[in-house]
């Protein structure tokens, strides 16, 4: 009896789904035809082996059980045979793999389509979203083996009250953040990967009145619009049909023409930092975003560098003046993804010769927002 790999290769050699429609997808009439073909070709196999082949071709193969794990953080795939995943127990290698190179390539094509991205020799890496995962795909020749990274983000939306109950916030912190939103202060949420930046921003968005117009810009679809009055725009890096890319900087500029009460940037990571802070300095109060950094001091350095990318002619003093005019607070999250919460909140103070003064907010005293 042919083993699973041989049977898969036989199926694909006789009826390759990637030949039926561009990028390995089926037209509806062809999909049923191919399903019947696979069932016919595998009917003599043990039912468990037949089901494994069907899972490999039509679903997500060895990843299917992983995608259902509640405590999953990341999945890393390095070619058809090396699959790793990280949970609260740490990084482990999956005791399973894709059954053949051709079925793995079919999986890559299907994942690319589901994530609305294109990877080919011209564009060998791309980012997208699949289910509750942020997806990054890189293909040869920039990597030795096709490498896929799936990073899970929490799709549940928590209120500030629920964050307090979970231990993410203390009661004084919850009250302070509610006042910050009411007072329409501008801030960035700071933290490393997996610290809960997106979860926290989503919670803050739920606390904003539905009558306020929020315009969200992201490079990956993760933030949840709190009301039907909210507009959301997603950048695009790789475009079919000769379409022009749409950058985060483009979206930030357009968001200012959409009558926003608040501007929200999913993650500040490029030249859009200049456009965002200019907008905040000229009246778009109550706005927020996230920035990847490990501390408030590191966040300021990163922010200065990102602004310089968009305005290399500006002096460092001018950049720091802009930061002082546009941002009120930096909210730093804990680095431990198993024990998430607020590490510190700092207020951006006066600009001195050596740089911006940072003053930590003391939640043990009655809250005063200057």
Image (cartoon, rainbow, N blue to C red):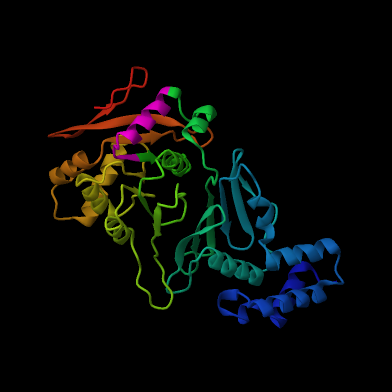
Q: Is residue 271 magenta?
A: no
Q: Position of residue 36 (x, y in %)?
A: 77, 76
Left-right relation of 11 to 194: right
Instruction: Decide if residue 67 is on the left or right side of residue 161.
Output: right
Q: Quadrant of the C terminus?
A: top left
Quarter where residue 50 is shown: bottom right
Foreground of the two, 84 or 259: 259
- The residue lying at 45 percent from left, 44 percent from top is 198
For image coordinates 49% across by 36% down, the residue present is 159
What range is drawn magenta here?
172-188
Q: Position of residue 264 (x, y in %)?
A: 35, 48
Q: Quadrant of residue 238?
A: bottom left
| Foreground residue among 276 and 16 | 276
Identify the main secondary structure in magenta.
helix
**Quarter assignment of residue 10:** bottom right
> Can residue 336 be seen?
yes
The answer to whether residue 279 is above or below residue 106 is above
Q: Confirm whether the magenta stretch covers residue 174.
A: yes
**Furthest residue in direction front, as rendered:** 211
């Amino acid at each position: 009896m042919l083993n699973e790999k041989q049977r898969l290769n036989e199926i694909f050699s006789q009826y390759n789904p990637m030949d039926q429609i561009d990028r390995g997808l089926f037209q509806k009439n062809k999909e049923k035809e191919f399903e019947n073909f696979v069932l016919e070709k595998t009917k003599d196999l043990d039912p468990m082996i037949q089901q494994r082949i069907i899972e490999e071709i039509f679903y997500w193969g060895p990843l299917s059980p992983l995608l259902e794990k509640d405590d999953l953080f990341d999945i890393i795939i390095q070619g058809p045979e090396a699959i790793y995943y990280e949970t609260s127990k740490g990084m482990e290698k999956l005791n399973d793999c894709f059954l053949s190179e051709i079925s793995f390539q079919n999986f890559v094509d299907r994942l690319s389509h589901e994530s609305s991205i294109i990877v080919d020799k011209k564009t060998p890496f791309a980012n997208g979203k699949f289910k509750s995962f942020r997806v990054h795909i890189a293909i040869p020749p920039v990597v030795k083996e096709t490498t896929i990274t799936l990073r899970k983000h929490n799709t549940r939306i928590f209120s500030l009250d629920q964050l307090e109950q979970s231990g993410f916030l203390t009661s004084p912190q919850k009250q302070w953040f509610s006042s910050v939103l009411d007072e329409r202060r501008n801030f960035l949420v700071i933290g490393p990967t997996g610290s809960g930046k997106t979860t926290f921003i989503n919670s803050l968005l739920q606390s904003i009145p539905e009558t306020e117009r929020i315009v969200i810009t992201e490079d990956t679809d993760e933030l949840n619009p709190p009301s039907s009055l909210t507009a959301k725009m997603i950048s695009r890096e790789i475009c079919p049909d000769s379409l022009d890319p749409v950058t985060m900087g483009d979206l930030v500029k357009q968001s200012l023409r959409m009558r926003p009460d608040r501007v929200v940037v999913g993650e500040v990571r490029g030249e859009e930092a200049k456009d965002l802070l200019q907008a905040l300095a000229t009246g778009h109060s109550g706005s927020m975003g996230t920035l990847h950094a490990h501390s408030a001091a590191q966040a300021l350095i990163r922010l200065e560098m990102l602004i310089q990318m968009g305005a290399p002619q500006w002096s460092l003093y001018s950049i720091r003046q802009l930061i002082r005019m546009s941002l009120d607070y930096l909210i730093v999250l804990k680095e431990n993804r198993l024990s998430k919460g607020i590490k510190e909140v700092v207020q951006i103070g006066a600009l001195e010769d050596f740089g911006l003064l940072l003053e930590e907010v003391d939640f043990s005293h009655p809250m005063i927002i200057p």
